[in-house]
Amino acid sequence: MMASTFQGPANMLAMLLFCLSFMSLQWQIQGSTYEAQGRAGGKRTIALLDSLAILDTHSIFFAGLAARGHKLTYALATSPRVTLFEYGQPLYDNMVYFAPTTTVFTAPGLEGSQTLADFVAQGGNLIMAADVDMSDLTREIASEFGVDFDKKRTVVMDHFSHAPALDLKGLHTNVVSSNLIENEKILGPVAGRKGGAAPVVFRGVGHIVDPENILAVPILSGMSSTYSAAPLKEIPAPSLASARLTNAGTTLGLISGVQGRNNARATISGSLDFFSDAYFQHRLDTTGQLAGNELVALEMSKWAFGERGILRASNVTHHRADGSNPEHLLATKEKPDLPFSLFPDPELNRQSLVYRIKDDIIYSLVIEEYDADRGGWVPYQASDVQLEFVMLDPHIRTFLECVPETGRFWKLFKVPDNYGIFKFRILYRRPGLSVLAVNTQVSVRPFHHDEYERFIFSAFPYYASAFSMMAGFLVFGVALLYSKPQKGDREGKSLKKE
Amino acid sequence: MTPAASALDIRGVGKSLLAEYRKAANTQTKIVDLFLAFIVATGVLQFLYCALVGTFPFNSFLSGFFSCVGMFALTVSLRLQLSSEKNVEKAFGEYTFCCLLLFFVVFNFIG
């Protein structure tokens, strides 16, 4: 009876451990076959709105998303029935947050600004637009992503580059800017000042991103004459030149993109009107052409919703240059005579792969890029992908060679003259692309005793010397032992006793 | 003293030293000294070669050079034993044993 009661929990424990090990095995298999960072091209999209009127005023933007296959769900941000998560899983891949004036969420699962941060932390993408009269909640959400909007009642203005036709009050708040980021992963064909799009019109609030924030990129910035201030409020003369007017010029942020460490993306615009039909259809006064808003907004949303610039790695292989595979550190040994143990072998990775110092080895992997415009996963091309061979420090850091047709990146290199546990490490971080981090561990051993080079040509004199010593010893021995004492030797003494 | 005179003196000293050596040393000692000269020459040649070519097979150089150094030391010991009237067979036997040991080590290390 006692035995059986004790056996029950033990069995359960064994089952649990077995399940755990099985799960970790599964994980390893997944990790070894295909390592993707970031979620590519999710189409479940929710739009949280201030009012349903935004569906009319911003219909072109939503139609553009729907045309790319997004299954859009519209909801009022204040609705008590909005759910973003079910059983801890996000219900949507992307979110359009066009609710700048919403002050509080009423749905049970939504708890202030933290909810949207959680949504992105779980891998969701976010496009968010603020407005001149945005609520504190909107500011808090933006600051969760490191985007600090300018003070209340400030607006971005520009007296040289603006759109008067949209300007009802003559405050020059409809800023026209062509200062778009030169990054084709983010903006596609419209990247850069001389890109395929006309200047865009922007009416809203500027923001600042910490320049040391490596996760954020400015997508749209102000022109050199753009500044952020409260209109109809006189700026004291000394302040114009001094610290009061900090946010101005080409560093003034209008739209910024933040890519989290989980590669989810949050794109934050200071203007809701930027996405509106009226601005999409606005013709610029200077040239008469259509403003670039529609092109830029839709291209930007491709990046923001993971339809472009997501990398994945697969087929990570490494072997010696002659094609042979590395050996295992220790062969796995069956132990049928020993009882089943819950405790594994001591800390020793028997399956660890071992190379020898000074081996020539080839490392290769396939990197693919997700680009929905080009039909999904396409081979990635770059000349700046670096491989590091690391034991605490990188002993080797080298560029990988790229085969453009297949996206295969490879390098032949010589293992350094240091033995220990090494990692092949690829950490590829570029603006507009998801971060690619691939680590593969191998061991490096020193030469075996019989692997040193022998009969080296330049060592022949030394061999000759050693042999001449042996021969000399023989000749000397014979000569010494069989020499006859001479007459002149002192006292006629002989070494040989006769 | 003029330089010529001093050179003459040194040459005279060398000559008398050689003559004295020829007269005083017995045949065995001469053979030993000849072998010692051979060992020194081999060692010096190796050293020059190493300085010229580089130290690449350093273990080979070390074992080649040390075979000379070791043989020199052992032969000098033999010479000392011979000059102090001991059992020659015993002295030479010990010398042989040490030499074999030296060769064993040298050929293990030479690569």
Image (cartoon, coloured by chain):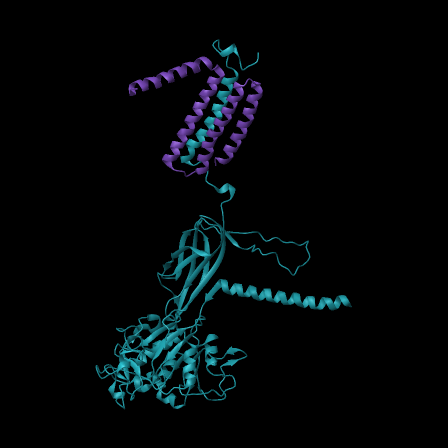
Chain colours: A cyan, B purple
Which residue, as the protein is rendered here, is positioned at the far left? A286
Q: Position of residue A494 (x, y in %)?
A: 53, 13
Q: Pick whichever, A345 or A318, lies toward us.
A: A345
Q: Is residue A186 left or right of residue A73?
A: left
Q: Residue at x 49, y 47 (%)?
A: A446
Q: Position of residue A266 (x, y in %)?
A: 41, 76
Q: Is residue A247 left or right of residue A330?
A: left
Q: Residue at x 77, y 67 (%)?
A: A2
Which residue, as the protein is rendered here, is positioned at the far right? A1
Inspect this view and state whether residue A313 appears.
no
Q: Residue at x 35, y 77 (%)?
A: A208
User: Residue A93's quadrant in the figure?
Assistant: bottom left
Q: Position of residue A365 (x, y in %)?
A: 43, 60
Q: Pick whichever, A157 or A421, lies toward us.
A: A157
Q: Quadrant of the C terminus of chain A?
A: top right
Which residue, as the protein is rendered here, is positioned at the far top? A487
Inspect this view and state whether residue A237 appears.
yes
Q: Position of residue A328 (x, y in %)?
A: 54, 52
Q: Residue at x 38, y 61 (%)?
A: A385
User: Up-down: is A19 above or below A390?
Assistant: below
How many labels were placed on the picture? 0
User: Up-down: is A26 above or below A155?
Assistant: above
Q: Pick whichever, A407 or A357, lies toward us.
A: A357
Q: Quadrant of the N terminus of chain A?
A: bottom right
